[in-house]
Amino acid sequence: MKQSIRHLPLLALLFLALVLSACASHLQKKESFLTQAGFRTVKPSTPEQIAHFQSLPSGHIRHEERNGKTLYMLADSSKNLLLVGGEAEYAQYQEILYSKEVEPGKKADKITKGIANIWDQGWGSVLGSMVPQ
């Protein structure tokens, strides 16, 4: 019992490292999709830009109205960069995201539903009888 308690801090560190690496890879994927969609990379340089950059949550896409236009921004504090795009770039990002993240899931759903239909059409009882009891 004492041995398992002793390993608890190590397990907590391992779990934290796993969570952080998953977040980092998710952010990298998001940045890649935004870049493919035409978002520009901006490094904050003036005190105003730096202050605004630091006010943005890292890794989350935010939108702002500027001079009658909508801008979409993603801040990456670890790289000290900001990805900026307009409505057209954001629409392109959504299309890329849909095609790479949602569409493959729909294909998997179709396969799962197809298997369920085969099972429901009587194959379940035939295949089930082959399984040793």
Image (cartoon, grey):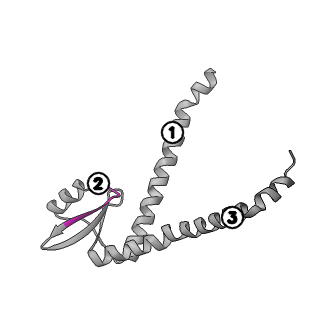
Amino acid at pointer 1: Leu
Q: Are marks 2 and 3 in contact (CB under 8 Å)?
A: no
Mark 2, secondary structure of its residue: loop
Say which of 6 and 90 sits in front. 90
Sequence-earlier tag: 2 or 3: 2
In three-dimensional space, the C-alpha distance between marks 3 and 1, rounded to whole angstroms, equals 41 Å
Residue at 63% of width from left, 24% of height from top? 3
Query: Which label was assigned to residue 13?
Result: 1
Counting from the top left corner in percent of width and height, residue 6 is at 58, 26
Say which of 10 and 60 sits in front. 60
Instruction: State the quadrant of the C terminus.
Output: top right
| Residue 44 found in image quarter | bottom left
Residue at 12% of width from left, 73% of height from top? 67
Counting from the top left corner in percent of width and height, residue 109 is at 58, 65
Query: Which label was assigned to residue 115?
Result: 3
Amino acid at pointer 2: Pro
Residue at 16% of width from left, 64% of height from top? 46
Residue 99 visible to an observer of this rendering:
yes
Q: Furthest residue to the front? A: 121
Please tell me how crowded label 3 is: few (under 14), some (14-19), or many (20+) other residues with Cα within 10 Å. few
Image: magenta residue range: 57-64
Mark 3, secondary structure of its residue: helix
Magenta-colored stretch includes residue 60? yes
Counting from the top left corner in percent of width and height, residue 95 is at 41, 75
Q: For mark 2, what is the residue?
A: 57
Residue at 21% of width from left, 71% of height from top? 70
Amino acid at pointer 3: Ile
Q: Furthest residue to the left? A: 67
Instruction: State the quadrant of the N terminus.
Output: top right
Counting from the top left corner in percent of width and height, residue 64 is at 20, 65
Magenta-colored stretch includes residue 29? no
Mark 1, secondary structure of its residue: helix
